[in-house]
Amino acid sequence: MREQELKAALGKNIQYFRLQRQLSQADLAWKVGISITNLSNIERGNTFPKAGTLCTLAKCLEIEVYELFKEEIVHDESKTLINRFCDDITKNVMQTLEAVYTHYKK
């Protein structure tokens, strides 16, 4: 794995775990003790955090440090997250359509 690929995988995994825990970038940055800009640059693969920041990120995300570098998380589990969002959106749209139908049916 090249350096840029490592940065990209790290960034995507941090973003995945952050979203899975329903944290904004501001929330996670505050917990870790870094700026939002710094976290954003890490998630976009522009910068690589110091070792201490990596440890703190993992602790705040309730995972082990090595999980931040697993390539398969980006590919497999992000699909699960996307599917969950799609299911939620579909459910909300169906509920709204049902409410509109019920309202105008009267």
Image (cartoon, rainbow, N blue to C red):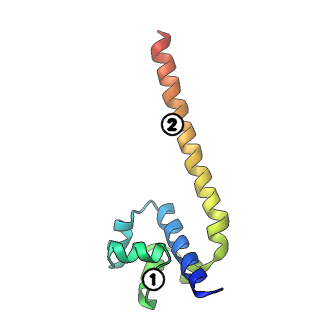
For disc 2, the marked residue is 92
- Residue at image point 47% right, 66% down: 18
Q: Mark 2: few, some, or many residues within 10 Å (few <14, many ≥20)?
A: few
Label annotation for residue 21: none
Q: Position of residue 39 (x, y in %)?
A: 40, 75
Tell me the SS state at disc 1: loop
Q: Earlier in the sequence, mark 1 or mark 2?
A: 1
For disc 1, the marked residue is 47
Type of amino acid at the residue the image marks with label 2: Asn
- Quadrant position of the N terminus in the picture: bottom right
Residue 63 seen in the figure: yes
Residue 66 seen in the figure: no
Q: Position of residue 46 (x, y in %)?
A: 47, 79
In depth, the one of 30 and 35 nearer the eye is: 35
Q: Position of residue 66 (x, y in %)?
A: 58, 83
Q: Position of residue 86 (x, y in %)?
A: 58, 46
* On screen, residue 19 above or below 31: above
In depth, the one of 31 and 100 nearer the eye is: 100
In depth, the one of 7 and 53 nearer the eye is: 7
Q: Mark 1: few, some, or many residues within 10 Å (few <14, many ≥20)?
A: some
* On screen, residue 29 above or below 53: above
- Residue at image point 50% right, 11% down: 105
Type of amino acid at the residue the image marks with label 1: Thr
- Residue at image point 57% right, 39% down: 90
- Quadrant assignment, res 69: bottom right
- Residue at image point 52% right, 24% down: 98
The Cα–Cα distance between marks 1 and 2, rounded to whole angstroms, is 38 Å
In depth, the one of 1 and 34 nearer the eye is: 1
Q: In this figure, what is the number of numbered marks? A: 2
Tell me the SS state at disc 2: helix
**Would you say the residues marked 1 and 2 are in contact, meaning their CB atoms lie under 8 Å apart?**
no
Image depth: mark 1 or mark 2 in front: 1
